[in-house]
Amino acid sequence: MHKFEKIEYKPIPVRQLLLEMKNLSELMIDLAYSSALYNDKDLAEDVLALERRVDNLAYLMDMEIMVAARDPKDAEALIGVSTVAASTDKISDAAADIAAIVTRNIGVHPIVGAIFEKVEERLMKVTVKPNSTLIKKQIDELDLAASMGVDIIAIRRNHDWILNPNKKERVYEGDTLITRGAPSGIEEFKDLAEGKLTTLAVEQRAKFEEIVSRFVELKNTSELMMDLAYSALMLNSKELAEEVMGLEERMDQLHTDFELLALTSDFKKEEASGFLGLIRLGVATEKIADAAADMAEVVLRGVEPHPILTLAIKEAEETVTQACVTPDSPLVGKSLKEARVHDETGMWVLVIKRDGRCVRPRADSRISVGDVLVASGYAEGADALRKLASPSQSCDAENL
């Protein structure tokens, strides 16, 4: 039985607690999926350790909010903070559920490799070879988020994992790196590392293709909901919050369809454990979606997002930012697909604010002068996006 750490009150700023909870919960999702993809028990155990850290932070957050709420007005102001903190805790629980698939030797079916080849942001495991140009360089020197849309989320060195490595951390020969990013950036980074990509054997059987496509939609939708929920909070946008709730209803149906498809597929007896792992992955995406819906509900209930919330979102490692498009921007007139914003900056465009409305764009949506792009991604890419949208003019997107 796990021994729980005793919780004692510590005077830690709410903003600091919320920021760490957001950063850790999002990191945990990537690490958990990586542990499942590569069947790595050490990495899965690290995810479970991070979950315990987030649980402790959640207790400390509850105590800080209780101390801060002196009257009904304070309680109303802080209820949004409390709800978002609880949602990040739920996200960390979902990541732990994924990791448990590995630690309990349930495993996932080999088609999971095909799944991660088709998601919007891919995970890759690569070993740094002796002639790599990355050797002895600091992560911040590489400027990966802005130049390739790639981030190093973990380094395995001398049998130990370095999770969410510091930007001053150096890369060494023999390091095994787990990276996350767009397909083109991932391939470019692989060439830089000059490593051999480790993948699981994938059975290319047509009967499982629909299961693959259904899970890809589940994963992408749940992660989009998280980004939109944080955007709704930062912008206090009921439009975006309603979009999240609409997607939550869609997720319910997607998840039901996925489970039925998995249970009725013609799998062999020896594949049963792997399919159980797939089903549990689907349950985890549903939990993430529910947590995003809880955050969106804060806005829909008319609760004014506390300044602490918006600051925590802006200062997080994965942030939401706004950039207004000026006449001299190379983005003007291009579709989102043509603009390749993520490849150039590492930021995903979630919403375009145009004529006072928030529009969720398609790949063929064209960018116009005066548009405000609401995007999510690593903080390092935020400046690159603003420079791309407004090359030579200052533009205060916050006040548009």
Image (cartoon, helix red, strand yellow):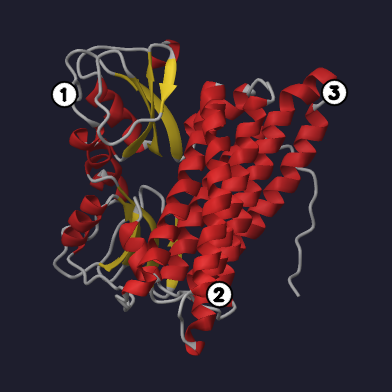
| Secondary structure type for disc 1 | loop
Query: Mark 3 highlights which residue?
Result: 70
Query: Image height check: is 333 above or below 142?
Result: above
Tell me the amino acid under the disc marked 1: Pro
Please identify, in this view, whether the residue under mark 3 or under mark 2 is nearer the observer: 2
Query: For the point 66% across and 40% down, which residue is it?
Result: 85
Query: Mark 1 highlights which residue?
Result: 330
Tell me the amino acid under the disc marked 2: Leu
Marking on residue 52? none
Pointer 1 or 2: first along the chain: 2
Disc 1 versus disc 2: distance between alpha carbons?
48 Å
Pointer 3 or 2: first along the chain: 3
Marking on residue 276? 2
Give the mark count: 3
Tell me the amino acid under the disc marked 3: Arg
Q: x%, y% of residue 398? A: 43, 15
Query: For the point 45% across and 74% down, which residue is it?
Result: 40
Query: Image height check: is 223 above or below 340?
Result: below
Any part of residue 172 in sight: yes
Q: x%, y% of residue 326? A: 24, 14
- The quarter of the picture where residue 376 lies is top left
Query: For the point 57% across and 76% down, which residue is it?
Result: 103
Query: Image height check: is 16 above or below 113?
Result: above
